[in-house]
Image (cartoon, rainbow, N blue to C red):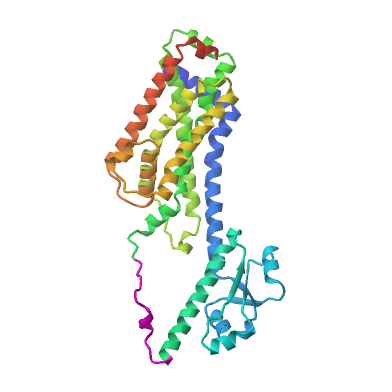
Amino acid sequence: MHPVSIVLGKEIRDAARDRRALLTAFLFPVLSPLLVYFMMTAIIELQTDADKMTIPIIGGEHAPALIQWLKEQDVHLEKFSGDAKQAVKDKDKELVVIIPDDFQQRFGELKTVPVEVVSDGSRTDSQPKVRRVHELLRQYNQEIGALRLIARGVSPDVTRVVVSQHVDVASKEQRAATALNFIPMYIILAAFVAGMGIAVDSTAGERERKTLEPLFINPVERYQIVTGKWLAATLFSAIGMALTLVLCVAAMGQVPLAQIGLQFHIGNGQMLSMLLATLPLAFLATSMQLLLGIFAKSFKDAQSYIGLLVLLPMAPSMYMMFNPFMTREWMFAIPMLGQHLLLVDVLGAKEVPLIGYFYSAASCLLLGMALVLITARLFQRESILSG
């Protein structure tokens, strides 16, 4: 057998016996889709609750026309008595609408009537309902204002100098891909998490157990041993990425995105494209972990170092979230950014150029092999073996 295949088989067997490594490899791919599902379901529930909500109201008898109009908008009202601000502070109520006693008088005198909406700005769960109430009051204000102008023989168009018309050029799939921007981040993150345990154990772990020196005594080139370790860690990393991708897509298929105007459907061709886009990143992620692992004095020490690599997959997602930019072909050659761009385009049902897949795969593989060769050269040093 070739030395690389011998080391590869040895590392796979060691990893299969190590429950800690298996737990590290597959816990994240299983938990992240569940997190995606529950997070999106909670967001949709908050939105639908805002559309079908019950508004506690004080002084509703002073504005019968407003109350009737709100009921026509399918809004449920309940009479509230007591201290509205204290009730909101105590989390007894999400919001309370207060109509002043002189509503009818000021309304009849064509004066502005202040209607208070008491809410807690620190409660994120109540914000959709608060926005819904303000939107309803704004609509009522516009309708009454238009009727007053018509009653005086003035067209309401006189007050409408400019009317904005929203034209959205993005498809439902592209809007869904933007809203689900965290899914590509999770898939890329899986490349660094799933293979981390094997990469750390085969470097810092073996040095801590004093098994590296007996391994290197064999008449085998160092790069062959490192390559075998690299491929073993890459295998677990790739399996973790594929599992994360499949489970995330399956989880999103169960989320009622249509209720918030999004459309999410991934076919077999898109799944294959996403796998081709992301799997080369597993080679780069594990090569970086192997290189960092040889500088750690123990398994625990290596985990703290390599844990910093987890921040790298988040960078493209966070940057694109706050600084959108036009995709250029050369961007696909940047590791992690290229994979993120490919995933977003595939999720958005965009046509991705084939050169993008080539650039992203070639950059990851070439950089990964370069890091493996550097790791093999460093293993020639006695100080690295002794720690």
Name the residue furthest right.
82
Which is nearer the eye, 289 or 206? 289
Q: Residue at x 35, y 70 (%)?
A: 164
Q: Residue at x 37, y 31 (%)?
A: 364
Quarter of the picture containing the C terminus is top right
Which is nearer the eye, 19 or 179? 179
| Residue 272 lies within the magenta run | no
Q: Residue at x 61, y 66 (%)?
A: 119
Residue 83 placement, left or right of 269? right
Q: Residue at x 50, y 31 (%)?
A: 195
Whole-percent x, y for residue 385 in the image:
52, 13
Which is nearer the eye, 243 or 168? 168
Whole-percent x, y for residue 359 in the image:
30, 36
Magenta-colored span: 151-166
Name the residue furthest bottom.
152
Whole-percent x, y for residue 240 in the image:
49, 36
Report the number of numbered marks: 0
For the question of whether residue 1 can be seen, the reply is no
| Residue 156 lies within the magenta run | yes
From the image, give the main secondary structure of the stretch colored magenta: loop
Whole-percent x, y for residue 12 in the image:
51, 24
Quarter of the picture containing the N terminus is top left
For the question of whether residue 71 can be seen, the reply is yes
